[in-house]
Image (cartoon, coloured by chain):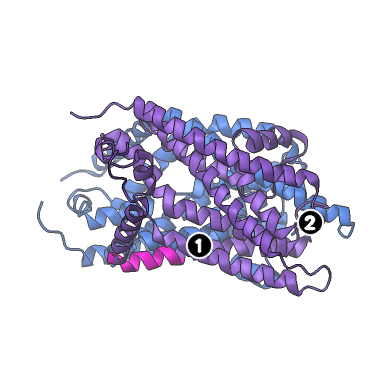
Amino acid sequence: MLTAPTWMNWKLSSWIMIFRTALEERLVYRGDFALGTLMRFLPIVTQIFLWFAIFDAIESKGENPKGLIGGFQFEEIVAYYLLTMLGRAFSSMPGLASGIAKQIREGEIKKYLIQPIDLIGFLLLNRIAHKFAYYVIATGPFALVFFLCRNFFINGMPDLLVISAFAISLLMGFLIGFFLEAAIGMIGFWFLEVSSLLFVYMLFSFFLSGHMFPLTLLPDQIEAVVNFLPFKYLAYFPAAIFLEKIPPEDLPLELAVEAAWLVFFIVVCRLAYGRGVKRYSGFGG
Amino acid sequence: MKSHDSHPHYWKVFATFAKNSLIRDMTFRTNFILQCVSSVGWTLMNVGFYLILFQYTDTIGADTGWDRDKFFLFLATTWFINSIVQAFFMPNAEEFSELIRTGGLDFALLKPIDTQFLISFRKVDWSSLSNFAAGLVIAAISLWNLSARETNPMVPSIYEVALYIVFVFLGIVIMYSLMICLSATSVWLGRNQTLYNFWFYITNFSRYPMEMYNRGWGKPLYGFFTFVVPVLLVVNVPARILAKPIDPRTPSEWLLVGWAFVAACTSLLISRWVFYRALASYRSASS
């Protein structure tokens, strides 16, 4: 029988081990990684020219002399796209849901059922390590691009309160992204093949998270609905906080709503896992 | 590597490839349908985005003539070209790199048929053609709107439509050549995952009217993607022929059309040269 402190120690050291292994695994491909990160900014070049052309057309007609679309100026739209890249760097979870579904399908999930390691905790730690490795390498390319584009941030740095709200929203964005996708992966307990379902989810989240364009551009009725959905926390919300598009007095409430969504997805994920494991039957070895 | 006495019937061979792929697709029918649905979903999302943009502006760029209906003709052209490239060439180019890496290219080299033909047309991804259908719907609606509008109604002439089809084809030729060149580099690089992303990002430039790059620090990009790697011509030239954003056409537009023709022929020749250079430096990967 283990006493409480040694149990804690054992638990801690195994989590540290998992973290270190995942970190090292990621750093093997650092060259490809850094180049890939830089390339991911290339579509923004197209966006800059597209939006310049649009604002150019609007301003030349003189109907909209301030040049505002959905409350955004040209420079702010570009800054918005850059910030959503940052938001997605936190909230995107490549391969998470499909990985879980694959483990269920191929029976690999057995090892979590017979070992004293919690699947969701293991995956979360793995993800944190991967993200951590990613930031170590991606900071360079990100800093370079943000430095080159500094003129698009016309309001300069926001104050400390906004910055901290921004940081909190990024962290919660990461967790929401994780638990949302993990919950989708759990569908694998019920359906063997989830890849097409995942593709549909990816399409929706690309559009509804604000990755494609700021959500304030949507027609009012649609915007009201989209604002109720959790997707906006994956990209739109952090960027809108940084660009001070969310009034400071609303920030606490908005962040509380986000936290509620996070709790919701944690519960859904846990429930789905619990139910799924009960359904699951593994054969052979 | 043609045999001398009996020419293979290229068309028949291609038809067999296409039939085999269709049989394969129909074996996993639900998957096929879901792929079609998700392609159409992607189309709808793009259409939604541009409809929202045109809520705020009349044209893309001042005095460029790319208003909503004409831009949607442009979009339809992008959809035609991309769907054909994705249906016929993308799966094959992907496999080409894989054949090089695994040594499976040996089998292709031994067949009594032109190797580039064999490598380029072996598989057809039929579900990508659903985007071609989506493009047809977009084109039909915008042509209808253009002909029905009160100021400057526009119906393209039969010559314009014929020229449009020719230049859509030449656009596909340019894309195909670029793709073959990129995938052939895997002979020298071993593997090129990043190059595929690169393909995606290069073609991203072709999706918008080219004049929008022609200012400030976009000029080098404009020059590069028009004259060196001519991806800007791919959609722009046919779309301008059909949509006629500037009426009457300017002489420089005709120069661009001429250049697109030259560029397509040159690209094809270069791709063939690169392909055979790659084959020459291919060393099998037998154990």
Chain in blue in the render: A
Q: Is the stretch drawn in magenta largely helix, strand or loop?
A: helix
Specify whether residue B32 is painted magenta: yes
Q: Residue A189 or A270: which is nearer the viewer?
A: A189
What range is drawn magenta here? B27-37
| Chain assignment, label 2 | B
The residue lying furthest to the left in this view is: A284
Secondary element under disc 2, as helix, strand or loop, is loop
Q: Where is residue A117 in the image (x, y as percent from the top left)?
A: 25, 48
When the figure is inspected, residue A241 is found, relative to residue B157, above or below; the finding is above
Q: Earlier in the sequence, mark 1 or mark 2?
A: 2
Residue depicted at x 71% and y 64%: B157
Res. B131 mark: 1
Position of residue B77 measured from the top left corner of the image (x, y, whole percent): 60, 57
- Residue A226: x %, y % from top left: 60, 66
Residues packed near mark 1 inside 10 Å, few (<14), some (14 to 19) or many (20 plus): many
Residue A210 appears left or right of B57: left
Task: From the top left corner, tell me how far across and down residue A42 is, in percent.
Answer: 59, 39
Q: Which chain carries label 1?
A: B
Q: Which amino acid does label 2 sit on?
A: Gly
Q: In the figure, is residue A158 to the left or right of B3?
A: right
The residue that mark 2 highlights is B65
Q: Which residue is located at x 50 percent, y 60 percent?
A: A203
Density class for disc 2 (Cα within 10 Å; few <14, some 14-19, many ≥20) is some
Q: Is residue B174 magenta?
A: no
